[in-house]
Image (spheres, coloured by chain):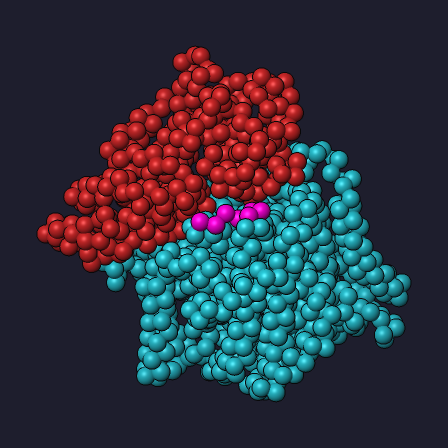
Amino acid sequence: MGGVGSAQTVEDFYSSRTVTILVGSGAGGTTDISGRVIAEHLERHIPGSPSVIVQNMPGGGSVTMTNYLARSAPRDGSVLGYSLPGIITAQLLEPGRARFDGRELNWIGSALKYTGIVSVMSTAPATTIAEAKRSELFIGTTGRGSPAHQFPAMAQALLGLQFNIVAGYESSNDVVLAMERGEVHGQSSSLQAWAISRPNWLTDGRIAHLLYMGPSDPLGLPNVPYLRDLVSTDRERALVDFIEIGSYMGWPLFAPPGVPTERTEALRAAFTSLMNDPEFAHAVESTVKAQLQPTVGRELAEFVDHALDTPDNILSEAKTILGLDRR
Amino acid sequence: MFDMALSALEIVFDPSRLTFVALGVVIGLSLGVIPGLSGIVGLSLLLPFTFDMDPFTALAFLVGLQAVVATSDTIPAVLFGVPGTVGSASTILDGHPMAKQGLAARAFGAAFSASLLGGLFGALFLALSVPLLRPFILSFGSPELLAFCVFGLSLIGVLSGGNPLKGLAAASLGLMIATVGEEPNTAIERWTFGSLYLLEGIPLVPLALGLFALPEIADMAIAGRTMRKGHGVTTAWGQLAGVRDTLSNFSLVVRGSAIGSVLGAVPGIGAPVIPWIAYGHAMRTEKGAAETFGKGDVRGVIASESSNNAKEGGALVSTIAFGVPATAAMALLLGAFLIHGLSPGPDMLTSRLDVTYTLVWTVALANVLGCGICFVFARQLAGIAKIRVGILAPVVLSITYIGAFQATRQWGDVVALLGFGLLGWVMKRVDWPRPPLLLGLVLGGLLERYMFISFQRYGTDWLSRPIVIGVFLVTAYSLLKPIVSDLLSRRREATNKLTIAFKHDSIDSAVWFNVAVIVFFLTAIIGSWQWDFGARLVPQVVGWVGLLLASWQLGWTSFVTTEAINPTGALEKAEAETHAQESGSDLSNLSAEETRRRALRYFGWCLFILIAALLVGLLPAMLIFLVGYLRIEAKEGWKTTLAVSLGVWVIAYLLFHQLLRVPWPTSVLGNLIPGLRSVGFTNLL
């Protein structure tokens, strides 16, 4: 295929193809919907305007999809991956499962970042960091593998909070329901997720935000403590760096290893031009209630290289804190 | 509110929307008929096409599709004993025996009309309850959901086909299988053997198709004929007889629908459990049900089908009112809401009540259309069963393979299908009930989840919550009643004449299977011994209980001889019934030797599909299998062989490869020549 590929212009190639974006999550959530919005709007930015379709390939926190993309998918630029924010963290924490190398994937870009925020009902026994060091708070999560578990677990370890983390809920929406009926006090989520699930809670004071981490959120969070400001040593800052990897990557779009360079570059250019498309920005705003925070392909690739260089001692300490050291 | 309902009616009956509802219904019905495909596939495929529609049309289209999948999934369940979707697994229990007795038309008539009434009930429930539902759903915390799961488990007693011991042991198997995967509290990987596929647990679709579809096709292929005489009598009159059955059991329809819509509205119970609960309820409350259910009692079909369709209306409630999808399909629909700029929540009950009522009317309309279409075409569909078995068996088998593969689209699905197919066939032959195993799998994960949350959050205080106490009391009653009466009947036998001595003649395949089950539980107990408490608890408890039950069963069959002096003794009666059932099966006229030989050939072909798929990809393997089976096994001429194989294959190719664009996992051939995967026509290798 290599020979044929290089004889063809990028436009020739894409004008006769359908591009498939494999979304590494089940249907219906933020990952799926933002992936579909990207697919819908990316079409007109790729030379040759191929139709772009979405396929869901859930499992293992996007690891199943990324394994497939890196090992089995055609390497011609007709199949791309769109994963949850934690995909590089997965490579660091679970090298046995993640059968791909982030350094070899062709990063196209990411449109959104993820600001994690731990929020509790205003009626909870503690609504500030100081109170949370004294009073127990039940924090609901889906499971140890998810960022919604890892954020509060890391904050608890670094700040000495009295969190009792209750894992096992089906989805973050189920945790919201559990908060509403008083079963747990709070969860780690994002302002964007709250804007979808309970927009009124953000304005009517039903929830209080304990702290946030990751990139500062464009929706604005006045007076909420920032995890990075609350730690002091280099070791602690390195742990915060580690936990924030997924936040800064956001939801990345990437191509398999070995895709012809001119096509990768064309896809990166298409993505960059998509990020400047007001129609796309509006679609993102109205569907997943988020503001664009783009990272273009080259930046993303550099960030991945940097993240994969996390020192071993920090990695093993993070595993202990997150309770992932026994598997 | 009434004005709103009327104006929503106008919206739905706008000709262009009506067209889309009808289109959605047709697509939904087609998906329901194909085993393994469900509304989720259709919704995710069609979602992008709705981007440019107005929100009403888009939702009417998608909801119309989803509302009727549960209507047509009855068809393969009744005709072949193959569940169209997981929701129709309980329909098989009585629907398929009816078809074998030549009553397919009546089963269809009853199922479709019960589906229609259930669907309408669900729509009504949605319309009336949306404003009232908030407090109801909020009163269901994890402890209440846990109690409901325990209640669900108590149904095992009635699903055990007269042998609670085997039923409970089979359920323990299901519960143990449910523990496969990553345990959320400890992040320990249980029985995953390093496989990413098993990390997420065993998916339901290949397990259900394996347990029910593969054995049914096996018996079809082994017997060499589809069904007993008279199966072809699918007349309009037959269907009307089924409708009469539904109408004369109207109170059962109402109860089944109520179970479906109310439980469907509670997020966390899970759609696959609901028809089983309705079936179990019918079995416990209907007159004489204990004797006739499972042998072709139309009431079993009515209970399952009414609840199955009613749950869709119910499931919409929590999606609309809370933005919490109660089922997987609803999660997709929630995505459609957001894409069209609608925020589920209190708004839907006030400012966007028009949307809510549009959905109500759509559900009602779709059910009417779906039921009508099924009625008209049932006769043609039933005609499928008249096709020669040599042609039918391989076609259904290959569709089942591709269908099972849609669960996660990994090789594991195909392996799981074959593994559970073997297990299901053995269980069928040695007379172990399979529904409890499926129920155990469905409930196992939920049970563990809600148990840990309840204990971690409330300690033991959750046991004193009123709904929990109420549900537990109902559970205790229904659980103890059959066990006590079973023990009493056995004791009566025992006082008659009971000999405890090893029975040499008792060693048959059933005993070997029993021994295998014991070994399985022992292995599981040893394998989970070292795990952290949180990961170990459930496998250990289930393991010991399963071990005890299976050993008890083995001891009973190998050492205890009972002879009822009283000729009307319960045990003798039970034995006579089992015997009657055996001889009623399709294989009675074959010698054990011949049955075994044909079964080996059949499962050899099943294995052949798997190996061929690994070598050249699933779709090409399907073509090779069809040609091979039709030529070699069924000894069809080349003309028929090629016409059938190519016909079926081209449809599958267009549907799965071109339309659904399934990302096929790589085969050996695809790995050798990666270039093939870059070409649209051949990237199925």
A267 in relation to B103, above or below: above
Visible residue check, residue B128? yes
Decide whether the magenta segment is chiefly helix, strand or loop. loop
Task: Identify the residue at horizontal 10%, vertical 52% (top origin).
Answer: A7
Give whichever of B67, B194 is nearer the camera: B67
Q: Which span of residues is magenta-colored?
A: B341-347
Task: Identify the residue at horizontal 43%, vertical 73% (top origin).
Answer: B395
Relative image position of residue B10 (x, y in whole percent): 51, 67
Query: Tell me, what hue is chain A?
Result: red
Task: Identify the residue at horizontal 43%, vertical 40% (top origin).
Answer: A289
Relative image position of residue B367 (x, y in whole percent): 56, 69
Relative image position of residue B125 (x, y in whole percent): 65, 60
Q: Quadrant of residue B587?
A: bottom right
B113 in relation to B264, above or below: below
A161 in relation to B47, above or below: above
Image mark count: 0
The quarter of the picture where the N terminus of chain B appears is bottom right
Query: Tell me, what hue is chain B?
Result: cyan
Relative image position of residue A40 (x, y in whole percent): 32, 51
Give whichever of B685, A243 is nearer the camera: A243
Task: Identify the residue at horizontal 44%, vertical 60% (top origin).
Answer: B58
Give whichever of A114, B235 is nearer the camera: A114
Q: Is residue B544 left or right of residue B594?
A: right
Q: Residue furthest top?
A: A233
